Image (cartoon, rainbow, N blue to C red):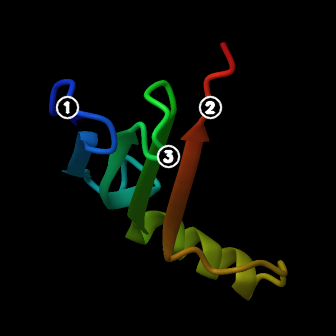
Amino acid sequence: MTLAGRPADGAATGSGRGAWAARPRLRAESWSLDGGFAWRGPSGRREDALSFGVSYARIGSGACGLDRDRTAFGEDMVLRTHETVVELNYIMAFF
């Protein structure tokens, strides 16, 4: 995550991004891309924070092949091809 310091209320306090790739036989995912951002004091309260992030991962050929084989032998399942995660957080300080 790349932090942008301590700006005034309502300004973005940080952002993040990342990507990686792996050999498909070693991991279920073959590549991933993600990113997000955060605000400190989005509602005028300095102690509160709002963050948003998105991540996308492509499932590797080994895992997809296993799913196809399992389906061919009669197992009722969904073929995995990708995964997407969307996250929204609000942190509220009470004290």
Kind of residue indicated by mark 3 = Ser
Of badges 2 and 3, the one in the foreground is 3
Tell me if 43 is positioned left or right of 5 in this view: right
Query: Which amino acid, by three-letter code, is at mark 2?
Result: Met
Relative to 16, does residue 85 appear above or below in the rendering?
below
Name the secondary structure under disc 3: loop
Q: Mark 1 points at which residue?
A: 7
Which residue corresponds to the image point at 63% horizontal and 80% vertical from the top-left? Answer: 79
Q: Residue at x 22, y 48 (%)?
A: 18
The answer for how far apart the CA atoms under marks 1 and 3 are is 15 Å
Q: Quadrant of residue 25?
A: bottom left
| Structural distance between the alpha carbons of marks 2 and 1 | 18 Å
Depth check, front residue: 1 or 78? 1
Chain-order first, disc 1 or disc 3: 1
Q: Earlier in the sequence, mark 2 or mark 1?
A: 1
The residue that label 2 is drawn on is 92
Task: Please state if 51 lies on the left or on the right of 89 as rendered.
Answer: left
Query: Which residue is the extreme one toward the top?
Result: 95
Q: Would you call the spot at circle 2 few (<14 residues within 10 Å), some (14-19), or many (20 or more)? A: few
Element marked by disc 1: loop
Judged left or right of residue 11, residue 82 is right
Q: In which quarter of the image is the N terminus?
A: top left
Residue 95, numbered label: none
Say which label, 2 or 3, has the lower sequence index: 3
- Give the residue type at disc 1: Pro
Q: Label 3: few (<14), some or many (≥20) within 10 Å?
A: few
Proximity of marks 2 and 1: CB atoms separated by less than 8 Å: no
| Residue carrying label 3 | 43
Q: Which of 9 and 67 lies nearest the eye of the viewer?
A: 9
